[in-house]
Image (cartoon, rainbow, N blue to C red):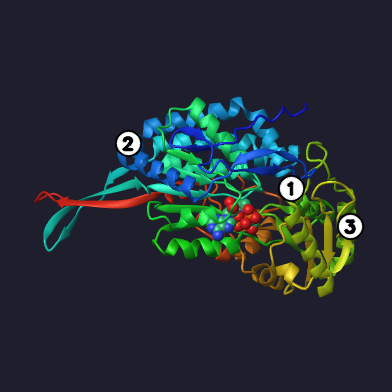
Amino acid sequence: MPLPDLSPETRHLIDGRLVESVSGARFPNINPATGDVLGTTADGTVTDLQAAIAAARRAFDATGWATDAALRARCLRQLHAGLVAEKEQLRSIVVREAGAPIALTPFMQVDDPIDMLEYWARKAETAVYEQPMADVSFLGRPQRRILRREAMGVVGAITPWNAPLLLNITKIGAALAAGCAVVLKPAPDTPWSATHLGRIATAATDLPPGVLNIVASSDPLVGEALVRDPRVDMVTFTGSTATGRRVMECGATTVKKVFLELGGKSAAIVLDDADLAAVLPGAAATCLHSGQGCAITTRWLVPRARYTEALGILRAAFGAWKYGDPEDPANLQGPQISARQQERVLASIERGRAEGARLLFGGDRPARRGFFVEPTLFVDVDPGSAIAQEEIFGPVCCVIPYENDDQAVSIANDSIYGLSGAVYSTDEQRALGVARRIRAGTISVNGGQWFHVDTPFGGYRQSGVGRENGEQGFEEHLQTKVIALPGVAGQG
Ligand code: NAD
């Protein structure tokens, strides 16, 4: 079925109204598969962002939003219905502005993400916000205590471009469910996956003005104003580890809670008893969405005893991998998001060559329009080299030979990251034993899938701080308060 025409919302949502920037400026939105300009978006500055923060502050402080869980659940369900009604339009936006392969949109980019709002609606209405604690005695006097969970306040959300609708919904869903007011600042490369949500929110929901604000900008540094502002209580950020460090630094000036979902360099360990013919073709999935996924396993650890056999299977898998036009359902790999990212990925590949890794497949820019990079397979990769240590965020798989299970675990853990990982073995217990030793937030054993809205997702080490989704993801948006009262003598 052809994608519907784009007629996206291109204005900010501030205080319940869809508005242009105060400056009147606009910036272009580029289709990475062609390099063509799709259209323009209102270009927010710190002035627009500050209006959004003021609106969010008012909505949080002066309305009953934070304490009306039934209203929150209703609004989240209305938002869900509004998004379902415009699902094909949203699919069009995500495919065209993010270059996301259409075949991946049901799971990672559009359908499942939209349905996550149902989970957040249920969470809002079923969470326990106040409960008694066990009575205690203090200096011989009985004491009662009430444990309360209250919304964190105004949340500044900053999102990347690789899964823009998913991450915008993830941030908005959890924060609104908990009773927070939100200012969302999306990535400059994918503004409409955010601004279009603004139109749906105004048209389809009873969200009080100011509870949800969305400000797009061509200037990534506008986000710093959100992080520094004392009226913002918490920042939830998804992006690179380098920017995450900067966000943490900027948040320190007001000692605000900073929640970070950052980069990864996850390892897949193929144990020596694994069915290589069944497992190794999966390594080509390093190139899914052009390798632009934080949790993709980009380091494949293969037993030296079966190395030659493994390389034959890997070479064939990369040769059979389909990439190209993201609107063609046969392709699971489209372009890199921008010319800049394409250059960055190609520079990493050059570095890999210079470091002495053996290029078994790909490595070049294909002769076509758009920001494409060939699916690329490096073997004989030194685990300490830059291509084995740095997040490339491109379709580049690094194969590293190892001698025994202990060495495989130690290579997997030799990273500043700790986001995800995978283990393959015909012996499930053995694989589980290895999975328990990997220091990362989510591990797949024998192809098991952890991705779901109720799965707490996040990283060890420099892959992040905190967990998104699930009960833990909800709790990140709540403060804890204890109220103590004198107990009743003779009771407790
Ligand atoms: P990025 O860090 O360049 O940008 C992310 C967001 O931060 C964008 O909205 C950007 O405009 C904004 N930003 C940039 N500089 C800023 C600053 N100084 N202050 C405040 N905001 C700033 O990341 P990206 O290139 O958009 O996305 C790719 C990265 O995101 C990869 O490293 C990937 O691993 C990571 N990622 C992580 C997860 C996860 O859940 N762990 C999910 C998706 C992507």
Where disc 2 sits, the SS reads loop
Does the image show residue 137? yes
Where, by quadrant of the figure, is residue 165 drawn? top right
Q: Residues within 10 Å of mark 2 (few under 14, many from 20)?
A: some
Left/right placement of residue 331 relative to residue 165 reads right
User: Closer to the camera, 145 or 257?
Assistant: 257
Q: Tell how many labels.
A: 3
Of callouts 1 and 2, which one flags the residue occurring earlier in the amino acid sequence? 2
Residue 1, percent across and down? 77, 26
Which amino acid, by three-letter code, is at mark 3? Arg
Q: Residues within 10 Å of mark 1 (few under 14, many from 20)?
A: many
Residue 49, percent across and down? 48, 47
**Numbered tag placed on residue 315 in the rendering:** 3
Of callouts 1 and 3, which one flags the residue occurring earlier in the amino acid sequence? 1
User: Closer to the camera, 220 or 388?
Assistant: 220
Q: Residue at x 69, y 62 (%)?
A: 391
Q: Residue at x 81, y 36 (%)?
A: 328
Residue to which mark 2 is pinned: 63
Where disc 3 sits, the SS reads helix
Image quarter for ligand 1: bottom right
Does the image show residue 442? no
Residue to which mark 1 is pinned: 289
User: Closer to the camera, 276 or 219?
Assistant: 219
Which amino acid, by three-letter code, is at mark 1? His
> CA separation, marks 1 and 3?
20 Å
